Image: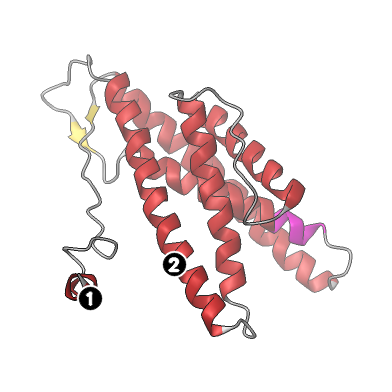
């Protein structure tokens, strides 16, 4: 099923990032460009780098200028993340372009790629919660609490992967149909953000 492959790729990306564990390391995508595997790996890499940006910016001792630079990187990362989701949805639209849609077909609350986006973030939560469970310098109470949270995350993974795979099956069989909306983020647009427009 699609989600089993996607989750393996997300885990591979997360593991590779943590070899160096630096937000400024280059992305070395092992999959052929224009493949869905390439998009999935890149999507999770962006999420992983942003996860660590978010850690860094919460440092109470961070220099204000460094925080501003980091905020700009987070904004750029968010835009890139959104673009990747739209590329993944384009892949699904192409995959199911020839499906005959049932007259009784319904639409889902989110597109397949936005659900896959949630799965990518969930892979990061599971990885980092496992890291907490495996700590040798933490109190037993902390480890027990994190083990409980990890169990919930693993259940969530099972539920989410089942739901996504079912959605894709329903689309493939014409019981559901896709409708993709561009996110139309306004804060990075010189014309749509009034602060940026004034500065032009």
The residues tagged by marks 1 and 2 sit, at their Cα atoms, a distance apart of 15 Å
Tell me if residue 158 is in the magenta stretch. Answer: no
Disc tally is 2
| Residue 111 x/y as whole percent | 30, 40
Instruction: Specify which label sits upstream in the sequence, 1 or 2.
Output: 2
Residue in the picture at 46% in, 70% down: 71
Residue in the picture at 61% in, 61% down: 52
Image side of residue 130 versus residue 11, left or right: right
Task: Specify the principal SS of the magenta part.
Answer: helix
**In front here: 11 or 185?**
185
| Residue 86 x/y as whole percent | 32, 40
Image side of residue 12 versus residue 49, left or right: right
| Residue 148 x/y as whole percent | 68, 60
Residue 184 visible in the snapshot: yes
Residue in the picture at 48% in, 62% down: 73
Read off the residue under disc 2: 72
Figure quadrant of the C terminus: bottom left
Q: Which residues are magenta?
A: 129-134
Residue farthest toward the left in the current orientation of the protein:
103
**In front here: 158 or 26?**
26
- In the figure, residue 53 lies in which quadrant? bottom right
Read off the residue under disc 1: 195
Q: SS of the residue at dot 1?
A: helix
């Amino acid at each position: 099923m699609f989600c089993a492959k996607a989750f393996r790729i997300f885990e591979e990306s997360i593991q590779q990032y943590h070899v160096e564990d630096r937000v400024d390391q280059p992305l070395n995508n092992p999959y052929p460009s224009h493949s869905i595997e390439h998009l999935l790996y890149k999507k999770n890499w962006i999420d992983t780098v942003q996860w660590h940006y978010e850690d860094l910016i919460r440092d109470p001792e961070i220099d204000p200028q460094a925080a501003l630079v980091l905020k700009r990187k987070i904004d750029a990362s968010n835009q890139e993340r959104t673009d990747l989701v739209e590329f993944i949805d384009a892949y699904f639209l192409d995959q199911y372009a020839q499906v005959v849609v049932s007259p009784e077909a319904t639409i889902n609350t989110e597109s397949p790629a936005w659900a896959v986006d949630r799965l990518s973030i969930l892979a990061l939560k599971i990885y980092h919660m496992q890291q907490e469970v495996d700590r040798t310098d933490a109190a037993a109470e902390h480890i027990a609490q994190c083990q409980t949270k990890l169990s919930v995350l693993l259940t969530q993974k099972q539920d989410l992967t089942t739901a996504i795979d079912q959605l894709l099956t329903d689309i493939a069989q014409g019981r559901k149909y896709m409708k993709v909306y561009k996110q139309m983020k306004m804060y990075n647009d010189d014309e749509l953000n009034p602060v940026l427009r004034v500065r032009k």
